[in-house]
Amino acid sequence: MVKICCIGAGYVGGPTMAVIALKCPNIEVVVVDIFEPRIIAWNSDHLPIYEPGLDDVVKQCRGKNLFFSKDVEKHVAEADIVFVSVNTPTKTQGLGAGKAADLAYWESAARMIADVSKTDKIVVEKSTVPVKTAEAIEKILTHNSKGINFQILSNPEFLAEGTAIQDLFNPDRVLIGGRETPEGKKAIQALKDVYSHWVPVERIICTNLWSAELSKLAANAFLAQRISSVNAMSALCEATGADVFQVSHAIGKDTRIGPKFLNASVGFGGSCFQKDILNLVYICECNGLPEVASYWKQVVQVNEYQKTRFVNRMVSSMFNTVSGKKIAILGFAFKKDTGDTRETPAIGVCQGLLGDKAILSIYDPQVSQEQIQRDLSMHKSELDRPPHLQPASPTAIKQVTFVWDAYEAAKGAHGICILTEWDEFKTLDYQKIYDDMQKPAFVFDGRNVVDVDKLRQIGFIVYSIGKPLDAWLKDMPAVA
Ligand SMILES: NC(=O)C1=CN([C@@H]2O[C@H](COP(=O)(O)OP(=O)(O)OC[C@H]3O[C@@H](n4cnc5c(N)ncnc54)[C@H](O)[C@@H]3O)[C@@H](O)[C@H]2O)C=CC1
Ligand SMILES: O=C(O)[C@H]1O[C@H](OP(=O)(O)OP(=O)(O)OC[C@H]2O[C@@H](n3ccc(=O)[nH]c3=O)[C@H](O)[C@@H]2O)[C@H](O)[C@@H](O)[C@@H]1O
């Protein structure tokens, strides 16, 4: 029986390995992690991450050919294929701080693989890494290899959170990069054999190592670039009376452009877009390509601008101050159908409002109070670290309360601010909400989920990104 071990039981390692186990009953899959609470949760009825369909997949194979363990070394030693799916956050100190990927967790995993291995292994880069990482990993493995043959493959993951199971069941493509030697080709074939249990062969793309590594960074950069492009247009729409929804629809009908990823928003979030683009920027700079670097950097800068613009719009609409005013924050996760808050635009928006002394009442159906406290009180560099390296208890912020209901959040509020596109926000009883709010009552929709005309009829002053402005907002001072 082929044995797979995956180092890192996070958003990628957990779901990806669960699907491999489900689709390949003849393969034993063990997911290992140094953070014990996560392993305990994977072995319980309350999985550590919320992902539609995941519970079902895990229930079907856990204990049969899918295992979660903290015994990292034992399972790595026994495996034929070792996936490495550990954190690769942005470096916060030293050379390349603020841009380069921090490969410390990857390096320590590689050293451990070299130490404990007694048989030949295929080591698979599942984490998103800078192009040429495989070369460094190869050096670590071969310098300590005691004659063991390691083949390194790059197999970047393209799943999106909230649709991870669907994406894994039916991927647009699986990408495998490897050395172009006979041993490299054999290793590529071994991994291809795993995926071809359920992925049509024409969707399995095999390349050299560097193309696979760079394609992952490029894919995320292209996706984020589309969002920043449409968000840049949203600012122009507000200034001119055009409607960004109509503009997106019109341009998306061009088959060369396509309709996806053209939703204007308060900004993109998630653990990867920003870090991967900054990493790309750093690689360009290191390769003497400053113009290419500054092109991609602009994607992140427009994203920052969009969040600032949103906060400024809120404050200026509400008589240029939100000091002492209650604002209901609906949604904190970086997108719907996940409880993940990494790099969520909600952090920047809430911090902006708190900076102007607002009182926030936050509701999100999947994010815990503790997580929100951490996000609002801890420094970004602390949040990017693996869980076992984060401070245990965050400082509570007095101006923030947490509620488990959108109506409760909005009671007595001056304004509502929608930061995640949860479906339930589309169907709230906005008349009831309006009746319970201070007047004038404002809605700031950072995800374009509400029916603007209907809410204006109720009496709300509505700001919806990239939509023609309410007469009230037009009279307010210009925003950054
Ligand atoms: N979250 C996502 O949707 C996607 C993430 N990626 C990439 O996948 C990688 C992992 O991301 P996530 O799963 O989101 O991170 P995560 O933070 O959810 O999981 C990483 C896990 O690795 C563990 N870990 C770190 N060092 C370890 C070590 N030496 N030994 C054992 N366990 C260790 C941590 O405790 C943590 O549980 C990153 O490189 C990311 O860029 C790629 C595609 C999608
Ligand atoms: O490398 C990764 O981590 C992953 O990053 C993204 O996946 P994810 O961040 O989970 O979610 P997306 O659906 O891409 O959304 C990212 C952010 O962009 C925002 N977004 C998305 C689409 C859009 O049109 N507008 C928009 O503002 C979302 O609300 C969210 O905040 C990519 O879509 C995945 O292919 C990739 O594997």
Image (cartoon, rainbow, N blue to C red):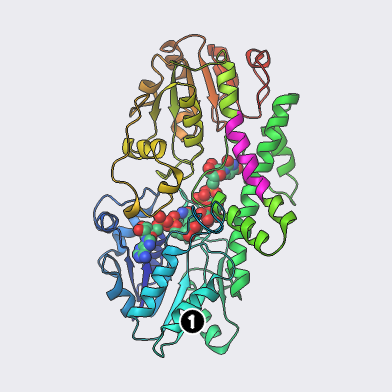
Q: Is residue 188 magenta?
A: no
- Percent across and percent down for residue 143 are 45, 83
Above or below, comparing residue 106 to residue 400 in the picture? below
Residue 426 sits above or below residue 179 on the image: above
Q: For this rendering, which residue is in front, 198 or 476?
A: 476
Q: Which residue is mark 1?
A: 151
**Drawn side of residue 120 relative to residue 136, left or right:** left
- Residue 444 lies, in percent from the top left, at 54, 24
Q: What is the secondary structure assignment of the residue under circle 1?
A: strand
> Which residue is most to the front?
94
Residue depicted at 59% across the width and 67% down the height = 131
Residue 305 included in the magenta stretch of the image: yes
Residue 97 place in picture, x, y as percent: 54, 54
Quadrant for the C terminus, please: top right
Quarter of the figure that contains the N terminus = bottom left
Residue at the spot x=69%, y=55% of the render?
A: 293
Q: Quadrant of residue 319?
A: top right
Q: Which residues are magenta?
A: 297-309
Marks counted in the figure total 1
For badge 1, the amino acid type reads Gln
Residue 214 position (above or below residue 434): below
